[in-house]
Image (cartoon, rainbow, N blue to C red):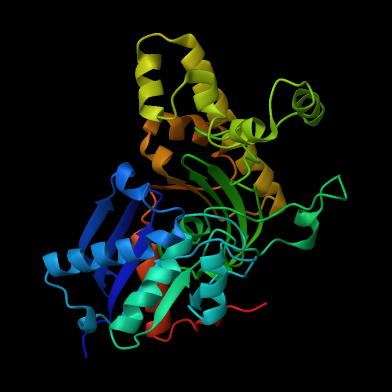
């Protein structure tokens, strides 16, 4: 019998990425981008299910891949209640909550729905999600804030953080659950996590903008000044939330969320752009050191990943401040498709047991 054939599905707000794997070898990939005017015909993201399903089938036909020949389907995990890391079998409860958007509206909710539909049409094949953003392995101390009404939450780039942690473990000749790591995912949002023997015991809530400011998020702010601004009458609740996530951070300072554009401005002598850029790297370095303290300074490796990790300049600014802590591994980008396929593969080969989503 050959290697398991896996189709990975990753829906975005205006696109769907699919990739076909044999084992963990990618055979082909297709990125479907949708016209905004077409998407306006649907009242919400879940109503796009049938449309996106047909587009995926069209891509399969174009690549000469028969649905019934695929052994397993894996979708990007969406917004569920907090769960431990792992590969989860898609079940009725998960589908019900995804369709109802019980825990929030996001395109990734379609990942499980589309994977399940395709698996059913392929003859009832296995279907999974892997390490959704709601993975929660926080230690008890990490949940406590200084405000009893507010508990810290674990919402971060779990799929990529876990995948790169396993990758560095392989390079070190160790198992992931034998290591103490700090992983920094640097993208539109930034998350920095302390990985203790296979669990992310502390991490900033990257969805709400906690932690370092990023290209699109404000990051942690001075509490008193923030409260005063909220009650100043200058902004509505909706406007304030957008300032924190989407319109905060680098884009608020410089009008762009593109690090490459900022680097061009710096090269042209823009001192403000240089200061903001350096400040973002400074805050990332502070966060890495902060999460190193969670591990009592006993860190086997620091991992830097995400789209900003392609920037040698930014990575250098961070590493020069934290290289004293531990060896640094840099894995640019976030190969979510491979991470999804590897999660399914671990179950199909018996390396990992699939988890059941339940209350």
Residue 220 sits above or below residue 171 on the image: above
Q: Taking the image as drawn, is residue 296 in sight? A: no
Residue 23 picture quarter:
bottom left
Which image quadrant for residue 63? bottom left
Q: Nearer the viewer, residue 317 or 147?
A: 147
Residue 254 visible in the snapshot = yes
Q: Is residue 172 left or right of residue 3?
A: right
Q: Is residue 297 left or right of residue 77?
A: right
Which residue is at a point 82% across and 27% down the rendered structure image? 224
How far across and down, in percent of the image, does residue 269 sit?
40, 8
Residue at the location (47% across, 16% down)? 273
Residue 249: x %, y % from top left: 56, 29
Whether residue 205 sits left or right of residue 60 in the image: it is right
Comparing 49 with 344, the one in front is 49
**Residue 115, percent from left and from top:** 37, 72
User: Image quadrant for the N terminus?
Assistant: bottom left
Q: Answer above or below: position of 328 versus 348.
A: above
Quadrant, the C terminus: bottom right
């Amino acid at each position: 019998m050959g290697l398991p054939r896996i189709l990975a599905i990753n829906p975005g707000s205006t696109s769907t990425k699919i990739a076909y794997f044999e084992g963990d070898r990618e055979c082909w990939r297709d990125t479907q981008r949708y016209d905004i005017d077409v998407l306006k015909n649907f009242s919400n993201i879940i109503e796009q299910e049938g449309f996106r399903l047909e587009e995926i089938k069209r891509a399969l036909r174009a690549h000469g891949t028969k649905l019934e020949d695929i052994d397993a389907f894996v979708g990007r995990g969406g917004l569920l209640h907090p769960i431990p890391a792992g590969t989860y079998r898609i079940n009725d409860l998960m589908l019900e909550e995804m369709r109802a958007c019980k825990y929030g509206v996001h395109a990734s909710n379609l990942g499980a729905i589309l994977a399940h539909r395709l698996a059913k049409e392929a003859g009832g094949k296995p279907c999974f999600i892997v390490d959704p953003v709601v993975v929660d392995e926080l230690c008890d101390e990490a949940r406590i804030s200084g405000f009893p009404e507010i508990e810290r939450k674990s919402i971060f780039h779990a799929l990529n953080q876990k995948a790169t942690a396993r990758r560095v473990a392989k390079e070190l000749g160790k198992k992931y659950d034998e290591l103490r790591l700090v992983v920094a995912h640097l993208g539109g949002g930034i998350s920095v996590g302390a990985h203790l023997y296979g669990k992310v015991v502390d991490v900033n809530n990257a969805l709400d903008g906690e932690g370092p400011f990023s290209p699109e998020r404000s990051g942690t702010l001075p509490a008193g000044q923030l409260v005063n601004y909220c009650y100043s009458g200058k902004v509505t609740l909706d406007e304030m939330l957008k300032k924190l996530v989407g319109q905060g951070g680098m884009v608020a300072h410089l009008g762009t969320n593109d690090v490459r554009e900022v680097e061009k401005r710096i090269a042209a002598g823009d001192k403000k752009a240089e200061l903001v850029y350096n400040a973002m790297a400074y805050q990332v370095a502070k966060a890495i050191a902060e999460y190193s303290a969670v591990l009592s300074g006993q860190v086997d490796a620091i991992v830097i990943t995400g789209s900003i990790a392609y920037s040698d300049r930014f990575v250098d600014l961070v590493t020069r401040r934290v290289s004293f802590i531990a060896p640094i591994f840099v894995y640019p980008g976030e190969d979510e498709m491979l991470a999804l396929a590897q999660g399914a593969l671990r179950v199909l080969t018996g390396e990992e047991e699939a988890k059941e989503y339940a209350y």
